[in-house]
Image (tube, rainbow, N blue to C red):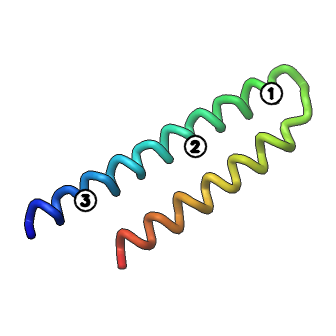
Amino acid sequence: MRKKIRKKMWEMMFTLIEMVKKEKHLIYLLHILKLEGRNPQSKLEGLQDCLVKLKNYAMQLII
């Protein structure tokens, strides 16, 4: 039973870490686009989606 719980916790931590990495990458891309003067609208939408998913996943971990 403990192994299953540990395995599930590891999977959730790994997923959360991957989502944070994606968020940081999108923020970096958004910064580059702003520096280049391009329209970052599509990247902004992707960042917002990622933030919502991250928030929802964190709420699931708390519950």
Residue 51: give x, y in percent of width and height: 61, 55
Question: Which residue appears at 34% of the width and 57% of the height?
Answer: 12
Q: Is residue 37 left or right of residue 43?
A: right
Image quadrant occupied by the N terminus: bottom left
Kindly give the residue lying farthest to the bottom in the view shown: 63
Q: CA distance from mark 2 to mark 1?
A: 15 Å
Element type at marker 1? helix
Residue at x 17%, y 65% (from the top left corner): 5
Amino acid type indicated by mark 2: Glu
The residue that disc 3 covers is 9
Which numbered dot is residue 33? Answer: 1
Who's the residue at 81% across and 23% down the image? 35
Which percent across, then down, holds residue 57?
47, 64
Asked if the residue at tag 2 contacts the one at tag 3, i.e. Cβ–Cβ closer than 8 Å, the answer is no
Mark 1 vs 3, N-terminal side: 3
Whole-Å distance between the Cαs marked 1 and 3? 36 Å
Inspect the image, locate mark 1, and give the three-letter code of the amino acid beneath it.
Leu
**Which one is earlier in the sequence, the residue at label 2 or at label 1?**
2
Residue 2 percent across, percent down from the top left: 8, 66
Q: Residues within 10 Å of mark 1 (few under 14, many from 20)?
A: some
- Residue visible at 70% across and 29% down? 29
Q: Secondary structure at mark 3?
A: helix
Mark 3 vs mark 2, CA separation in Å: 21 Å
For the residue marked with disc 3, what is the amino acid? Met
Indicate the quadrant where residue 32 lies.
top right
Mark 2, residue position? 23
